[in-house]
Image (cartoon, rainbow, N blue to C red):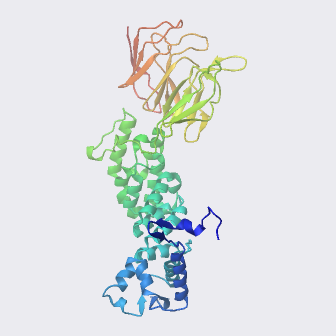
Amino acid sequence: MLPPGTSSPLCKMNEALPDGLLFKDHDFSSELLRQLNGLRQNSILTDVCICAGAWEVPCHRNVLASSSPYFRAMFCSSFRESREAKVQLKGIDSMTLEQIVLYVYTGAVHITADNVLPLMEAASMLQYPKLFEACSSYLQSQLTPSNCLGMLRLSEILSCETLKKKAREVALTYFPEVSTSADLKELCALELRDYLGDDGLCGEEEKVFEALMVWIKHDLQARKRYMQDLFQLVRLQYIHPAFFHHFIANDALLQSSPSCQIILETAKRQMFPLYGATSAPDLQPPWHVPPRNSYQDFLILLGGRKNSQQTTRDVLLYSRQTGQWQSLAKLPTRLYKATAVALHRSVYVLGGMAVGAQKSVPSHNVYIFSLKLNQWSLGQPMLVARYSHRSTTHKNFIFSIGGIGEGQEVMGSMERFDSNCNVWESMASMPVGVLHPAVAVKDQRLYLFGGEDIMQNPVRLIQVNGWSFPSCKRMRSHLSLKVYP
């Protein structure tokens, strides 16, 4: 007898009703299955044999019919199988059949790398959706960049949406690794087009181009005819001009295709405005296609001075996706009143006052930050050391304008960096040297608005510099210089 105020654990599974008690035995169904499986194993009351070739498994028709719509249709209709003592299941091997029957009678099955595919196919055919999804979950847990394309193709064959979604997610997220896999070479042209054309592909366009060329050259004779169609998937406007110049523009295979030649000519004209190129409207690359979704905009905060007036090397990044700040690799040195610009997915920090323990001096150094590598490197130094200057970008160029030089004078000099050739070139000086002007570039003209003199007095000027785009062999100087008071 139970102590007063206590109840039997069994009562917790019951439900009091106005006219009595609703008893619930939660172990009954599992115990019933266990008993039925014992009967099956001893061939007691079994009334049908499910066969895979010569392999026979005695079963109960009512158990099979209750477990799946497939068997219900087979045994509860006018099909001849409803009357036969033996039913042959085609396309299922004996080991898989044993696993399926064990699942029917116990609700459990051991899924392994060796049996997952035949189990999944059998679950699909015999209409066991939970087993099918269990196999899908197992395959998803085994996804890697080296096998995701094969899994993607398998998901199409099996019509498995959950596996397809996960495999595609891995294929898009880990594109640099996937691009070197053997499976990529085996894709058909339609599959490759669908893959490389996806906006969610997380990879640089240079890598997309390389993957395309590897695929074509894997079976050149058969695949060359797809080259023009697939080459247009490469978003040339987001490729570094130096990579385009050295590895794409003069590629022999692309040059062998008249249609690809036209695309290349159009791209050259866009990247290098004075390049004399012709193009056909119907074959122009989609120059206004937006970047892939994997390209993210970030706000980066570089150096500066803190409340203590100490010059900091801190670099912080703000992500709109997470709404959080995070620390990146610190600046290589403490810089005061340097400038920073973004070009070709890198950040350039130019000049500034290098703050040292003994003495602070203007710097002509250029530091380049790779967001992908979270790493700083030393770039080609400017021709003139300067701080309190202005910098801006246009096309493939960086312009560094004015500022204070090593003699603490206000400079009117200007220089530009050609990222294709990795060289700095002097340009025409400003008629009036100013500090911190507002800068804008439009139609090959650089506009300087206002600024300050050495005494921090405002300067009421608009200064304009026009230029021509140079080739890498020889830099050309400015075309014109105008001053508007």
Quarter that holds the C terminus:
top left
Residue depicted at x 46% and y 8% = 458
- Give the percent coordinates (x, y) of residue 475: 46, 27
- Which of 180 and 60 lies nearest the eye of the viewer? 60
- Give the percent coordinates (x, y) of residue 380: 57, 30
- Which of 132 and 27 lies nearest the eye of the viewer? 27
- Give the percent coordinates (x, y) of residue 378: 61, 32
Going by the image, does 61 lie left or right of 356?
A: left
- Which of 95 and 82 lies nearest the eye of the viewer? 82
Residue 255's place in the image compared with 66, above or below, is above
On the question of residue 379 being in view, the answer is no
- Which of 385 and 55 lies nearest the eye of the viewer? 55
- Give the percent coordinates (x, y) of residue 402: 51, 16
Residue 303's place in the image compared with 229, above or below, is above
Residue 372's place in the image compared with 311, above or below, is below
On the question of residue 312 being in view, the answer is yes
